[in-house]
Amino acid sequence: MKNKQKRGFFKSIWLKLLSLLIAFVIWLIVVNVDDYKIVKEIYNIPVEQINGSDIEEGGLVFDVTSGETVDIVIEGRRSIVNSLSANDFKAVADLSKLSYTNTAKISVTPKNGSYEDKLSITVVDDAMTLSIEEKKSKQFELVVSTKGNVADGYALGKATTAPAVVNVTGPESLINKIKTVRVTVDVTNRYEDFEVSVKPVIYDGNDEIMTSSRLEMNVEEAKVTVPVYETKSVPIKFYTTGKPEDGYELTDITASINEIVVSGPAEYIDKLSYLSINDLDATGISENTTYERSISNFLPDNIYLADSVDTIVITVNVEKLMVKNLTIAAEDIELINKNDDLYLYSIQMQGAYVITVTGLERYVDGIEVEDLKPLIDCKNLEPGVMPADISVTLSSRYRIDRNGTVLITITDKPEETTEEGTDGTTGNSPENGSTEVTTEARNGNGGIDDTGYANDQKTPEIITTEE
């Protein structure tokens, strides 16, 4: 009986072991089918640089030209691979082991050491390439830029920084790319002076920020002082130098703007009534000529431009002059300040007397002799024959030139005489029925000399202005 039971027990054990083995095989099959191997690509793993000090100790600096990040292909069980990202790997380039082409091999390992034997890692491009150069330092003026707008009626003055310049050190190729070092200040709704500390930022020629870790500045922050002033509108006045070509006249000056808004300390801006642009050279021009000027170049010290536009376009306009000749006849001339009680007056023209009027066509074309009102002033003239100056009405709109000679003759007026009076005596009684008229020439001042001209008399010119 016992033997029979013993044989049944061993038979049961083998069946149990067989079942366990079958179950394990089934589990193994299931695991391998469900957790199969897969391949995955992972991109942009940052590459850490080590032993870079070995390069810098030789007075050199380096910049990474390629290989700052690396891509890998990993192979392993799906349950592991699917959960991995770039953050789970460490990429390192040992710069102490550079090749002759200045490249360093990149190695990639999982941060979790337990995965190292469970993953196959292939680095797509396992080389970091360096550009190695001499170290260079250069100073740059610290430039202030602003964002936002100050309060209405106010404008920014010239901001200052402390320090005024910064020193940047790095690879020569990077230093040469630097255009400006700038601090940016927010001025939104500011209405009084203020100070702020700002970190300087390096910009290249394309006005893009240069973020290379190989560039170092000697300051972390700069203190910026920003003055804020009230504004004022002032007119612009324009002045020319030189004269246009002969036969042309400057008519007016026009500009793209005739008023600007400026700002500055009250003690300076209160004294400014207008801005003068006075370097417009009109020498020899015969047509309208355009000039461009920067308004800032004409601002007095401590005055700043508050407008956004600095360039002004100025046009100096010229026109061709018209010349008109007018001939004066004796009957056209008026004699003024005559003494008709004592003298007789007559005018003799010595050939043609021509008045030339030169000016712009719109002012000259319609002028006639009567508009010039030619006259001779007889005041203080003594009897005799003398040359006389003809005065005409002048105007700032045109120029008058005279060419010719006119003589004026002044004689004593005849006196009336009476041969016999009503009372039988000889006298000058008006009742006497007969008279005798006699004329005699005066001697002394105003006498006639050998030439037939008055020896010491000249009629003064009378000038009137007509706009």
Image (cartoon, rainbow, N blue to C red):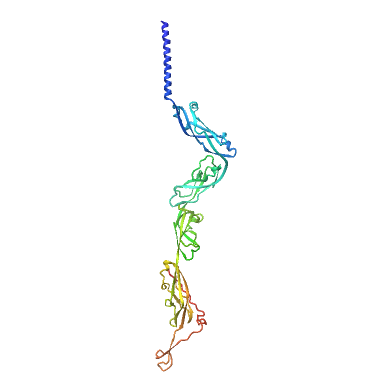
**Residue 113 x, y percent position in the rendering:** 50, 27
In the picture shown, does residue 283 fall above or below 373?
Answer: above
Check the image and name the residue furthest to the front.
101
Q: Nearer the viewer, residue 153 or 95?
A: 95
* Badge count: 0
Q: Nearer the viewer, residue 233 or 122?
A: 122
The quadrant in which residue 338 appears is bottom left
In the picture shown, does residue 329 fall above or below 281?
Answer: below
Check the image and name the residue furthest to the bottom.
424
Say whether residue 161 is left or right of residue 16: right
Check the image and name the residue furthest to the top.
1
Q: Nearer the viewer, residue 333 or 239?
A: 333
In the picture shown, does residue 466 fall above or below 291?
Answer: below
The quadrant in which residue 3 appears is top left
In the picture shown, does residue 111 fall above or below 386?
Answer: above
**Residue 145 x, y percent position in the rendering:** 48, 47
Does any portion of residue 397 appear in the rendered image? no
**Residue 162 x, y percent position in the rendering:** 53, 46
Does any portion of residue 22 appear in the rendered image? yes
Q: Quadrant of the C terminus?
A: bottom left
Query: In percent of the image, x 58 and y 39: which residue is there?
Result: 60
Q: Quadrant of the N terminus?
A: top left
**Residue 430 x, y percent position in the rendering:** 40, 89
